[in-house]
Amino acid sequence: MAFQNKNLSVIAYANGFTLWHYSAAETLSTITASGYFDSVKTLMNTGDIIIINGSDNTSIKKIVASTSITVAALS
């Protein structure tokens, strides 16, 4: 299953920072694969945070935006 816009929502936005939520019936490893969110890369910025609810787990990640969108572990 591929990314679906209807599963992505903004929880909060302020000063150029966005807190996102994404929920889907896919595994966390599928959702966090590089390029999964590329269809909305014009909306996401490096440093944004995303809460992901997958079929097997829930995680909080940070967005790394370049030529493609990557979700990375919080450091």
Image: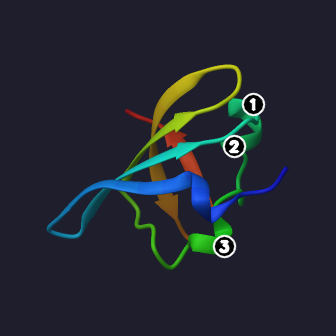
Image point (80%, 56%), residue name: 2
Question: Where residue 44 sits: x, y (%)?
Answer: 45, 67
Check contact, mark 2 vs mark 1: CB within 8 A.
yes
Image quarter of residue 36: bottom right
Task: Find disc 2 in the rendering and name its residue.
Answer: 31
- Residue with the most extreme bottom position: 42
Q: CA distance from mark 2 to mark 1?
A: 6 Å
Foreground residue among 73 and 17:
17
Badge 3 amino acid = Ser
Image point (56%, 47%), residue name: 71
Q: Secondary structure at mark 1?
A: loop
In the rendered image of this protein, does residue 8 appear above or below residue 62? Answer: below
Image point (67%, 41%), residue name: 24
In the rendered image of this protein, does residue 3 appear above or below residue 43? Answer: above
Q: Is residue 68 visible?
A: no
Q: Does residue 57 appear to the left or right of 26 in the view shown?
A: left
Question: Where residue 52 sits: x, y (%)?
Answer: 53, 37
Badge 2 amino acid = Ile
Badge 1 amino acid = Thr
Task: Find disc 1 in the rendering and name its residue.
Answer: 27
Q: Is residue 63 visible?
A: yes
Q: Secondary structure at mark 2?
A: helix
Task: Find disc 3 in the rendering and name its residue.
Answer: 39
Split into 4 quadrants, where in the image is the C terminus?
top left
Question: Where residue 50 sits: x, y (%)?
Answer: 44, 45
Image point (69%, 60%), residue name: 4
Q: Callout 2: few (<14), some (14-19), or many (20+) C-alpha neighbours within 10 Å?
A: many
Question: Where residue 9 sits: x, y (%)?
Answer: 44, 56
**Disc count in the image?**
3
Mark 2 vs 3, N-terminal side: 2
